[in-house]
Amino acid sequence: MSERKSAAGRVAGIVAVVLLTGSLVWMGNRRGLSRQQRFTQALKEPWTANPKYLLPMFGSGKKTEDEAQSDRRFVEIAVKGSGSSELAAIELSRMGWDAYRKKDYKLAMSRFNQAWLVDPNQGEAYWGFGLMTGLDEKIDDSIGLLRKAAELVPQSPKKARLFCDLAYAYSVKGDPVEPAAEREKIYVQAAKYYEAAEVSDPNLALTQSHWAMLLFKREKFKESWERASRARTLGGEGLDPDFAKAVEAQMKKSLAQK
């Protein structure tokens, strides 16, 4: 979620997310294709604009019978083409992440929705939903979806990034809160997720970079400097150069006052 806040302004106007599941054409001439070929072909079908597909889980609203039938057919093809609903959802989520990294947010949302359609317990789909919702500055919704993802994604070093995203979301949520005592409560929650991220992967520089920024906001300058230094040692992922200069300047100021 490191680019979330800056990206929000650029993508807040996202409209017209489209999904394969709204208008798949299931033609008889595909009967001769292999299961994998049919699944691959299904992913290339024309898309139909539908406002409800802008939302995670399609907004979880009622679908028409034609939409529901199309969904069932897509799930059938996806499962047969991949071997299981779990494998199909993993592949669709992978496509979602590829699109997200390329900033093709419409395609990313469609893939995460498809992954969820195939397997409603696919943690990475919820993770994707959480990031996409965060981009749209719906911070409470983002936190809820990321927390759901944290329940479903298995423990591994990779999960450290999910905990980082959750921590960052809480940090953003706390920024405008007044009074300071209430803001601090939210920051404390963010810190707990950074702690969980560090447990999952002690060598993830992103954790240290973002944790340093949270500590700086909490005016814990020495600890912030230590985390920033640790991040730099680990490669510096997520460590903003301007922030690094600011925390170093604050440390020099603090030492000069002693």
Image (cartoon, grey):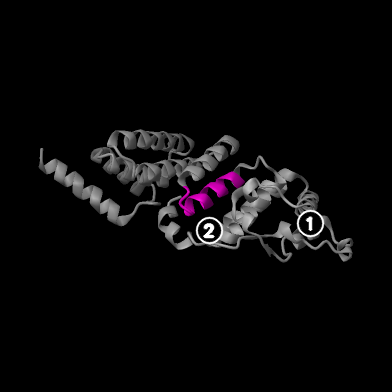
Position of residue 258 relative to residue 128, above or below, is above
Q: Quadrant of residue 241?
A: bottom left
**In the rendered image, which quarter is residue 35 located in?**
bottom right
Residue neighbourhood size for the residue with mark 2, other residues' Cα within 10 Å, grouped as few (<14), some (14–19), many (≥20): few
| Amino acid at circle 1 | Gln
Foreground of the two, 35 or 182: 182
From the image, which quarter does the C terminus lie in?
Answer: top left
Q: Residue at x 72, y 66 (%)?
A: 46
Residue 168 in view of the camera = yes
Is residue 207 depicted above or below 99 in this figure? above
Q: State how far apart marks 2 and 1 are (Cα).
A: 25 Å
Residue 96: give x, y in percent of width and height.
61, 55
The dot on residue 113 is: none
Q: Given the image, on which type of amino acid does mark 2 rest? A: Arg
Give the numbered dot on residue 36: 1
Q: Which mark is residue 101?
A: 2
- Residue 45: give x, y in percent of width and height: 74, 64
Whether 205 is among the magenta residues is no
Identified at 62% across, 51% down, the residue is 112
**Span of residues in magenta:** 125-138
Tell me which numbered mark, 2 or 1, is placed earlier along the sequence: 1
Q: Is residue 42 left or right of residue 205?
A: right
Left or right position of 65 against 183: right
- Prevailing secondary structure class for the magenta stretch in the rendered image: helix
Label 2: state its secondary structure. helix
Residue at (43% x, 55% y) in the render? 3
Q: Secondary structure at mark 1?
A: helix
